[in-house]
């Protein structure tokens, strides 16, 4: 039922209705002394037995729905971050003389020709150089403090 409805709440309601339809009640017993208790005992046992079979199906659908929802939200967030990053990079490229992408150790990551021209170097020379090594000693200390 969960795959048909794509919603675990509707699937649970459908399965509860299915349990009620599948539950077999014994025929009416004419003995009023123990007949009523026997009817309820059998009815409750049948309902419990149906829940034992239906609950794992509902839990499996709920877990699939939950993980699909989480995965979809992560994909949307990643797409939003990538779009924002691309927009920021395009603004930087249009407004700045050169843009630098740095690794965690402040070394250039894929240095561009604009950046090499800005420092008066070749692109290959910037690959293993830290940005701090190109700055004045006073500016380098201030930059690293930030």
Image (cartoon, helix red, strand yellow):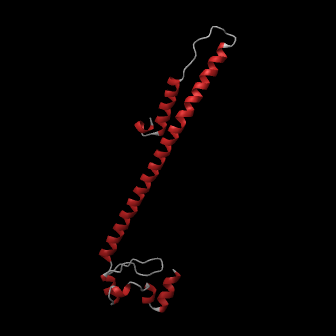
Instruction: Kindly identify the residue that appears in the image at 59 percent across and 11 percent down.
Output: 28
Q: Position of residue 133 (x, y in %)?
A: 45, 89
Q: Position of residue 114 (x, y in %)?
A: 31, 82
Please name whichever residue, 98 or 70, is drawn nearer the observer in this view of the structure.
70
Q: Residue furthest right?
A: 33
Instruction: Kindly identify the residue that appears in the image at 56 percent across and 18 percent down.
Output: 25
Q: Quadrant of residue 82?
A: bottom left
Please name whichever residue, 122 or 1, is drawn nearer the observer in this view of the structure.
1
Quadrant housing the N terminus: top left
In screen coordinates, is 96 left or right of 142? left
Instruction: Kindly identify the residue that appears in the image at 48 percent across and 80 percent down.
Output: 105
Q: Position of residue 16 (x, y in %)?
A: 52, 30
Q: Quadrant of residue 76?
A: bottom left
Instruction: Kindly identify the residue that appears in the image at 45 percent across and 39 percent down.
Output: 7
Q: Residue furthest top?
A: 30
Q: How many numbered tags mark residues here? A: 0
In screen coordinates, is 42 left or right of 90? right
């Amino acid at each position: 039922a969960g795959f048909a409805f794509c919603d675990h709440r509707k699937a649970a309601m459908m399965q509860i209705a299915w349990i009620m339809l599948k539950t077999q009640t014994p025929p009416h017993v004419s003995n009023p002394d123990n007949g009523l208790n026997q009817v309820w005992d059998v009815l409750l046992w049948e309902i419990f037995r149906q829940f034992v079979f239906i609950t794992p199906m509902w839990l499996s659908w709920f877990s699939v729905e939950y993980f699909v929802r989480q995965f979809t939200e992560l994909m949307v967030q990643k797409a939003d971050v990538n779009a924002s990053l691309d927009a920021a990079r395009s603004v930087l490229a249009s407004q700045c003389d050169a843009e630098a992408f740095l690794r965690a150790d402040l070394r250039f990551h894929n240095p561009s020709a604009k950046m090499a021209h800005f420092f008066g170097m070749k692109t290959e020379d910037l690959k293993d150089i830290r940005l701090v090594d190109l700055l004045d000693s006073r500016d380098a200390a201030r930059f690293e403090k930030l």
